[in-house]
Amino acid sequence: MPEFRSSCLWLLLSAFLSGMVQAQTWGAYPQMPPAVVQAVQSVRDNASSATPDPFRLFEQTDHVQIKDWLQRQNALTDSVIARLDGRDALLARLRGGMLSDVPPAQPTGASPMIENIETTDSLIYVQTGADQHRRVIIQGKTVGAERVLFLTADNQKIRRLLPAPDMSKLGVLTQTDSNGRTELHLSVVDISEGRLLDECITLADAAESNAFWKIDSKAVFYTRYADAYNSDTKQRKTEIAQHIIGEPVRVDKVIVGAGMAKPVRLSSDDTVRMRIVTNASLVFVEVTHANSKAKSYFYAKQSDVNGVATAWKLFAAPADKIDSMEFSGDAIYLLSRKKTANGSLLKVDLKTLKLSQAKPLVNDGAAILHELFAVKDAVYWHASEAGVSQLLKADTKSGNISAIVLPLQGQVSEISLEPASGQLAFVLQSASVAPARYRLGKDGQLVPVMPAGTAVQSTSGVLSKTFYLPAANRERIPLTLIYHAGLEMDGSHPVLLVTDYMTPPLFAPGFDASRMAWLEQGGIVAIAQMRSATSELDRKAARLVKYNAADSKNDPSAKVILAAEYLIKEAYTSPEKLAAEELDSAKDAVIKAALRRPDLFAAVHVHNVRSEALPAADENNTPKKNRATAADAVFAFDELRSGVAYPAMLISADATDTTAPLWMSAKLAAGMQILSANKNRPVLLRTSAKRSDAETQSERADAWAFLLWQAGVKKFSLTGAK
């Protein structure tokens, strides 16, 4: 039976309660609520194996005595934090522009860079006039005469220019913002006559890149809505239609949508996308199936496209597990996860159009393949191994494969292919380097993209590394360290060990500018990745790199203990300097680690900790000594022991998480305050009805000031000691 649940311990509690108000240098704990004291004394006088939990009253947070006790706990915590030197300076540092994020991408609705279109005898370009309206202008090469082909109206922006294959016509894709709604329209200009035709086609909002000319320049394929606008509809149904130039838009035929002939089968929630292969005069349809997110691909010759009766042929079924498909040169390039969950890059000749004859572009390996992109003469893809990204390029003419030289080892994200220029744009960051946006120029060189007025977060001299700690159960725990270059590893540095439940097990954590404030105190940040490989993709990928994924039976606190032991053994820090923090709600890895191995930590901060099982519906009026959901479940409250010198603790909680109610943190803090043998290491409790994003920086400054104080950093000494 866990000690804190036993009747014997309640006898000890009654003895400890009388000393609760003894003042320490940092202050004194508030007296326990009288009703709790009475309940403990009742247990002392009527001890039995079926003793009810005398701390059960803490679960009634609206009880007048508990509310008063929580208020006094908050007052104590606030008074201690207010007396910490360095706290205000730390908050100012966190607020002083440090938290700048990745430079923003071009916002939706901004006018993109539109490349000029050159013909044999003219140049077509976009120009902004003094009235801020944009004009599409054609300039003759011989005499330089100019003529306006298209002029935007109020609240209208030009998104793309789509020249017809024979250059006789020009599609102008525009965006109009009115009354809180955004609409995309495609207008058509006769280039030779310089005349705007009657066509004005309305596209679906997300269909900017899904409008194409037919190879004969006589029709346009486009995506439109299949249902009427309704402000309450989150996702509208779409279909692909064909518009013949010169005919009314109202007679446009649906070619991909309801009523299609076999083998295409569409459910009402499937989404469709059209792909054009200009070199082969082919049309591909990509169907993403709503029930599984798997994809099917169908194709037909452009000349055979004739409404919903088009005889589409199956190219790839959901079982082929095609993630993406691109076209370049005379081939189709595929990213498939059929053979390996890490992904395979395949090449299919457009002349055969047989997936069974696909050839590997590169050999399968430990790297995980992500996005795939293609331009006229090259294919690009994103791969990562051990959390480090690579961008690779295959020249479709020579077959040569090369790596794009990145300025740092980190993670690539937000990759996009700019339709007009055919250039890649992406964000690059690491745990120690702030995100930066880049564009791959035509010469193969990386060009930083920095919007005007964007502040740069300097991380010069800051390093990071990610490696794996071998655990006793053969699991390998990813641990990332962030530190200043040249830092002497002599055990003297305050280390902040934090848990990360968001990053997948085979990826490195991203950048967080606030960590620089901890490093500025001569410290080190250590990130223990707690997320197990729960998805089939994670599990298969993990096996390929000999990463043994944890399962639900593994105790996450063992990961925290393993990381703490490593940091101390390798002299990154010492037990007197090691702090741990867990901010994810309803977790208990850090608190359990601190209770099981208090000798490893100077202080911990936990938020919304789940310290015990939630009571069952029929337990509201019937106390039980242990309400664990499983016979072998052990919760943090069960780990409490008398006479143990626990580390200092800041336990924060709010009323927003029903899986780890506020009372769990209050109850745990009460037990810790009573039982911890080292009263110089305070156990502080801070609770609130709700957690505001505006208070995040202030809460972080409070928590880190507390942890740095307990780690012995002189700048965070306690002033006005009582």
Image (cartoon, rainbow, N blue to C red):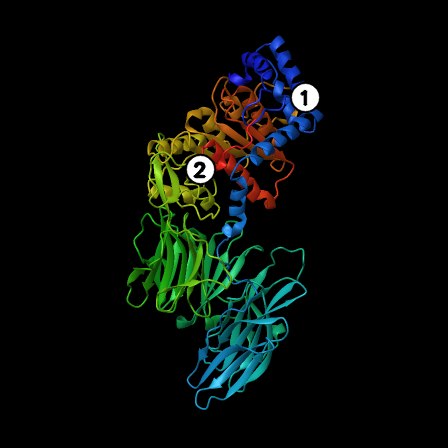
| Quadrant assignment, res 358 | bottom left
Q: What percent of the width, then of the height, locates residue 431?
A: 41, 47
Q: What percent of the width, then of the height, locates residue 374?
A: 39, 64
Identify the amino acid type marked 2.
Answer: Leu
Which mark is in front, 1 or 2? 2
Res. 46 in view: no
Q: What percent of the width, then of the height, locates residue 278?
A: 42, 72
Q: Looking at the picture, does residue 200 appear above or below residue 493?
A: below
Q: Looking at the picture, does residue 344 appear above or below residue 576?
A: below
| Quadrant assignment, res 91 | top right
Residue located at (51% from left, 77% from top): 126
Residue located at (61% from left, 26% from top): 615
Dot label at residue 621: 1
Give 181 or 527, whichever is nearer the viewer.
Answer: 527
- Which residue extends farthest right? 64
Secondary element type, mark 1: loop
Q: Looking at the picture, does residue 184 appear above or below residue 5?
A: below
Identify the amino acid type marked 1.
Answer: Asn
Residue at the disc numbered 2? 496
